[in-house]
Amino acid sequence: MFDRLRLYLDSIRARDPAPRSRWEVLLYPGVLALGLHRVAHWLFEAELFFLARFVNHLSRFLTAIDIHPGARIGRNFFVDHGFTVIGETAEIGDDVTIYQNVTLGGTNPANGIAGKRHPTIGDGVIIGSGAQVIGPIVVGRRARIGANAVVLDDVPDGATMVGFKARSTLVPVETYMRGFMPYGTPCDEPGEPRRGKLEDLEQEVAALRAELAALRSEQASTRRSGTDN
């Protein structure tokens, strides 16, 4: 048990350079929220729903992280900071990192019968702050969800999703296979499909401005010549 706890705390230190020791990591709200969720989920599985909800509300009060007791969470899960909501039928794999203000939300079933309504998050996924992942979709292994992205469709393995509605940036494999990408957001926007087009448009605008300036100069010279005559 203590070995598993030590490995868990070390996995967080590998993703967050701020803590100076494992003891400091123990004070993280995300660690407390996960520990209390394990208790709440055990009670939920035992159909002790009121007690499970009580532990859930206690955890939310203490940590500002709301994890429904029914959510299934794998090993080494880390919520950095807080203010995160995880729905009842969410499934989260191993080594997943979620930053603040993230929602793993559900859809309202059209038939009124509760079922799988929340996302399934694959192993090694990073979800940036403010992201909204909605519905019974699948986020593939080692995918990155950029800050404030809104994801409504399945995400392929290794893809980086940005924007509203989120789109893939087609990040090269050598980039997404790196050990860890803070906030799930590539700072240099690798593979951004519109970046080259924007640069081309800026060059065209500069060329048009230069031509316009030359025409104006030519017209001014012609007027001066007419006046002199």
Image (cartoon, rainbow, N blue to C red):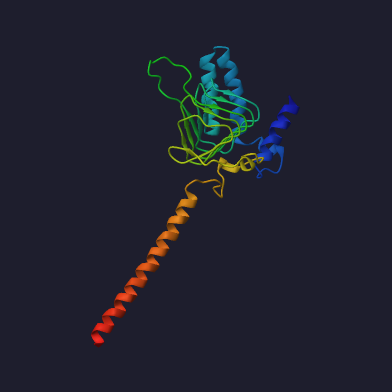
Looking at the image, residue 9 lies above or below residue 47? below
Residue placed furthest toward the front: 229
Q: Which x, y percent locates residue 211? A: 37, 68
Q: Position of residue 84 (x, y in %)?
A: 51, 33
Query: In which quadrant of the rendered image does the N terminus lie?
Result: top right
Q: Residue furthest bottom?
A: 228
| In the image, residue 102 above or below residue 68 | below
Give me the residue at 62% from left, 36% from top. Answer: 28
Give the left or right position of residue 220, taking residue 182 as reference: left
Residue at left 26%, top 80%? 223
Give the image quarter of residue 95: top right
Give the residue at the far right of this rendering: 3
In this rendering, the answer to whether 179 lies above or below 91 is below
Q: Nearer the viewer, residue 189 or 72?
A: 189
In this rendered view, identify the residue nearer to me: 173 or 47: 173
Relative vertical location of residue 54 with respect to residue 16 in this rendering, above or below: above
Residue nearer the viewer, 52 or 184: 184
Q: Position of residue 51 (x, y in %)?
A: 54, 17
Looking at the rendering, in which quadrant would you find the C terminus?
bottom left
Picture coordinates of residue 209, whole percent (x, y): 38, 66
Q: Residue at x 57, y 45 (%)?
A: 186
Residue at the location (34% across, 75% down)?
217
Q: How many marks?
A: 0
